Image (cartoon, rainbow, N blue to C red):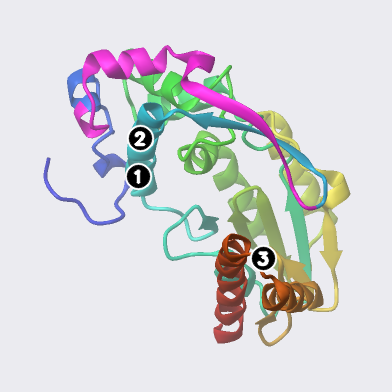
Amino acid sequence: MKTLPRTHPLKLSPLHKLGNHRRLAALLKTDVRTLKAMAALGTRGYTEWDDVNDKGKVRHIENPRPQLKKAQACLATLLAMIEPPEFLTCPVKGRSYITNARCHVGAAEIVTMDVSTYFQSTTWKRVFWFFNKRLNMPSDTAWTLAHLATLNGKLPTGSPLSPVMAYLAHEDMWLAVAKLAADAGCRLTVYMDDLTVSGGRVPESLLWAIKQEFHKTGLRLNNRKERRYMSGEGVVTGVVVTPTGVRLPKRSHLKLSKARKAFATETDAQTKAEMATRLRGIESQHRQVMKS
């Protein structure tokens, strides 16, 4: 296989029109027998548990076992090389929640929306559609990859493949939404399950049309998380967007302050080392926003 640029058009993907399981297995750094076995594992290919965050919210984790995760990661790398649209900021190398927010600097109105249970609502049928119809794979290889990517008919929450797969499985919908926004003179960005629309004015008719596109695809937007900002300042993917730039919200400064105080008073060596790692991460985020 010849070397391709880091990103390339979909038709140049080594997966395009791929109908040979031997070549497919080689791309995923395995063999045909193992590839087909992994696609048939179902729940035996995962360990599962409930994770509770600081706010008490429970998230069910479906973590693929090492061999399956390695194959999924290889596939994710290949899919991530397909040239992304300008509006997609995650998962895209070189783009982040900060660049996502920065796209909306200077807008008079900003509307943020959230996709409900994005991975769990992305079905096997949708994943198969992408491989079969968009990548023009024959049904047998598309079937194998759709089963490799999903668990119990949906995308698993802990797979390295799920972020890019969730977008591509609904690529037709996202492109339709982007056209609706552009036709209305608005800007769209998509950061995983967060979408933001901004402009001089964001009409309700546009938001209704976007929700209709989601409805046709089987996805839903969480109405309780929808926010409209009309003063040129709003919170986008955790960053405050202003008419002239971006900054961190007050809660982020408070989080950093608390983390520094806790680190300074901790006496247990192991706990202090863990806290140091978290603190470096928070400080790095602050530096990125301040730099931007």
Using the image, tell me which numbered label, if any, was put on residue 70. 2
- Pointer 3: residues within 10 angstroms few (<14), some, or many (20+)? some
Q: How crowded is the residue under tag 2: few (<14 C-alpha within 10 Å), some, or many (20+)? A: some
CA distance separating discs 3 and 1? 34 Å
Asked where in the image residue 156 lies, by quadrant, the reply is top right
Which residue is nearer to you in this view: 224 or 63? 63
Q: Camera-side residue: 285 or 204?
A: 285
Q: Which of marks 3 and 1 is nearer the N terminus?
A: 1
Res 10 visible: yes
Image point 30% across, 19% down: which residue? Answer: 35
Q: Work out whether 178 lies above or below 153.
A: below
Q: Is residue 275 above or below residue 193?
A: below
Identity of the amino acid at label 3? Gly
Q: Mark 1 points at which residue?
A: 77
Q: Is residue 158 left or right of residue 92?
A: right
Kindly identify the residue that appears in the image at 55 percent across and 46 percent down.
175
Which amino acid is tagged 2? Lys
Q: Is mark 2 on a helix, strand or loop?
A: helix
Residue 185 on image: x %, y %: 67, 65
Q: Is residue 66 left or right of residue 277?
A: left
Residue 1, picture quadrant = top left
Magenta region, residue range: 26-54
**Where residue 235 sits in the image (x, y, percent)?**
76, 69
Which structural element holds mark 3?
loop
Q: How many labels does the image show?
A: 3
Q: Inspect the image, locate mark 1, and give the three-letter code of the amino acid beneath it.
A: Thr
CB-based contact (under 8 Å), mark 1 and mark 2: no
For image coordinates 38% across by 47% down, the residue present is 80
